[in-house]
Image (cartoon, coloured by chain):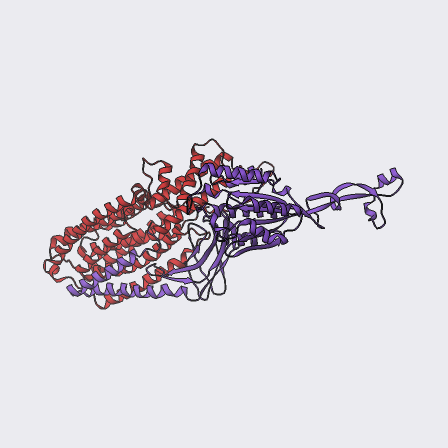
Amino acid sequence: MESSRSTLYRSFLVTAIVVLALLGLGLRLPAFLALAAAWAGVLAVAWYKAQRPLDGLRVRRDLYPSAFEGDEVPVEILVESDRPARMIEIADAFGPSITVEQRMLEPGPLEPGSARRLKYSAFCSRHWGIHPVGPVQVLASDPAGLFHARRLLPVTDEFAVFPQVYDVAGLAEFGARSSLIPHESSAGRAGQSLVSMGIRDYRPGDDPRRIHWPATARRGSLMVKEFEVDLAPYYTVFVDLDRRHRAGTGRKSTLEYVLRTAGSVIWTAVRSGGFVQVSGQGSKTLHIPPGRGETHLTFSLYELIRADLDGAVPLAEAVLQQLPFVPPQSTVVLISGTVFVDLGPLGDVVEALRSRGSRVVVFLVNNFSFPAISGWPPSRPQVLEKTQEVTFFLRSRGVPVRVLEESDDLETALGRGGLA
Amino acid sequence: MRRSPEAFLRARLLAVYLLSLAAVSGSILAWHPDRALSPLNLLWPPIGLGAAAVAGAAMQDRLSAMLDRHLRTRIRSVAGLAYGATLLVVSIGLLTGSRGAAEEGCALLRGLQAAFLLLAGFGRGSLGILINALALTATSILAGGPGAALSAALHGSLLMFFLAADHAARTLTEFPVETMPRPGPLLLRGAASSGAVLLLLGGFFALLPPAPYAPLQRAGAVVSLPAGQLVGLLTNLGAVALLAAIVFTALLRFGGGGRSGAAEEPAFEVASARRRTEKAGGARYAEPPVERKEWRARIVQLYVKTAEQLSKWGKRRRPWQTPREFARTLAPAGAAADLTELFGRARYGRDELSEADFERAERLSKEILDHHRRRD
């Protein structure tokens, strides 16, 4: 079937008008001229009618401004008009989808004062990042579809597509701070946890509700139940944004692996109920203050997708600069864009963090497993040797480490493999 | 439940039929008013054109899906050249005042109108039908008299109604909507412009009746009837046309005429979700739950429908192409590859597939079709 926007019949009419007019003039037969004039009049009226429905047409978009890669996003378009309108075609540009243009039809009748809601679902098939949504294009035509009028309405939004994140296995087992709020993690010292630690003698001021009556009966003196202290998981994620570690392109690049790993760590940490703060030294400082919950996760991912490997500060130095902000007894996750890290400064960082009671976890993205962007990469045996050296160095200090290669599937590497 | 603009498709077919009937009957009336009431000339246009229109509509999608876009274009070009040459010969004959051209040439064009209706699937829209109807009307105008007036006025006005019905049908087929608009107001808008053109041309011809082309009149090709006989003839023709229109509409409405199986069927159906009700006392029939193996069948069906739709847009899967090879010719490449992979698992795999897989296949199919629809 011919497309609805086709101008085939208009071309036919225009040609027919010309032929009929020529025949009428050439053969001096007014009947031809009358038919040509009638159709010319119809064309003129059609052109005028095509423009009218767009006057006073207003469009608004209802859209939650972020989603993960691969998510299906429902979008609602609200259409209002100051005058009656029918058959309004609406095309919305949805940047996160490969199929950029989403077309819908409002069949009408669209009456003044009443809004109509059109819905479409789009698939976030493009790479993570900030994508534009809009503008909205509205199209109308005359009843015969001979002329089409279009108008671009500046209804634009920004839409954040977050990288697909994965659960990082084993991360929740690490350090946490004591908390007054109940959490799943707890420590074996007296606190307010629901996890029972034991029974002790009653002291003045103890809550009478904590008296353990069976033990009191056995001992003949008041005994109270004692609980462990709750721990709030607290994570500090340091992301290596050193430009020297850039390698590969697109989905197979160090930027992708570093940020996706950081996203996965944040995701896992927030899901375990923990506080998360993120830091990175790019050309613009990546700083996400501590927070928890879904809103904080969204904010963190939103900031993360704006980061780039364009800094000049080595990871170890960045960590040392931010050391005062790392709370004691928390978990520190270092995500490096290379395996060629200086062991001296790294050792200092690990010792400094361990002296504060923090647990350190390290992810090393092997930038030399990706196609090099500039310079010659070291030979494979050298990379292997360095990788072994770094992993041995870290593991000998009790630091769990995971090396991520270009050939690794991140979901498997982070999820099933976890931290060795 | 699938919603297709049946009412608009029917109105469009009716408009095409009436337009053709007006052109053919007008041509007979203009050139052979003395023979217009013979049983053959009175009956063959409504019956022959009606049958051709219904058969053409029924075959339309099969014809268009039978060949790919390039081959269809080639056939159209060859047929267009042949038709153009025929029209040129007939026109030259008529303009030079040849009686033979008026006799045989117009008869040939009348016959071609039925052929155009029958082979509408090869053409771009209904362009061939419209061009030949215009050619017939133009030849009728050359004959002058009431036949020319009737032909021109009806052709001018019915074309407007056809355009309105056709635009609504095309738009609503291209954009499946959840609630189909009421056809009455939309078709009335077309009918209003049609009526305006009819009044305008009718008024003009009442004031200035069409004169015959002088060379043809001199050659004796134009036959005129006495006024009394002419009124009776027009009344009879009008009654036959009215009856034909009613029968044709009834045939389309109740007989399912002109609807080919997969004709206007979009690749997607708008399904209304409903909660399954518990069996009440075992008396009522309860819809059985969808078995897992059915998702595989549904995915295969979806893939086939997507391929059929793409074939209509000229992206035909060649007999020697495997699904993967076909997928490489499609865009977006990722969606095509994923859909093909799902199809492969559904068609040849051993694993059961789930509703989520079917929904994913639907999304991918929509993505591919949207992409190609935009380019079509």
Q: Nearer the viewer, residue B328 or A364?
A: A364
Residue situated furthest bottom in the rendering: B207
On screen, residue B337 above or below B126: above
Q: Quadrant of the C terminus of chain A?
A: top right
On screen, residue A379 above or below A6: above
Task: Tell me which corner region of the image, top left, top right, bottom left or bottom right, holds residue B202.
Answer: bottom left
Where residue B4 sits: x, y (%)? 41, 49
Number of numbered markers: 0
Asked if residue B6 shows in the view, the reply is yes
Q: Nearer the viewer, residue A156 or B357?
A: A156
Residue situated furthest right in the rendering: A220
Where residue A338 sits: x, y (%)? 50, 44
Q: Is residue A214 left or right of residue A9?
A: right
The letter of the red chain is B
Residue situated furthest left in the rendering: B219
On screen, residue A196 above or below B32: above
Where residue B317 sits: x, y (%)? 33, 39
Asked if residue B225 shows in the view, the reply is no
Q: Is residue A121 left or right of residue B253?
A: right
Where residue A110 sits: x, y (%)? 45, 61
The letter of the purple chain is A
Residue at (85, 47) in percent of width and height:
A203
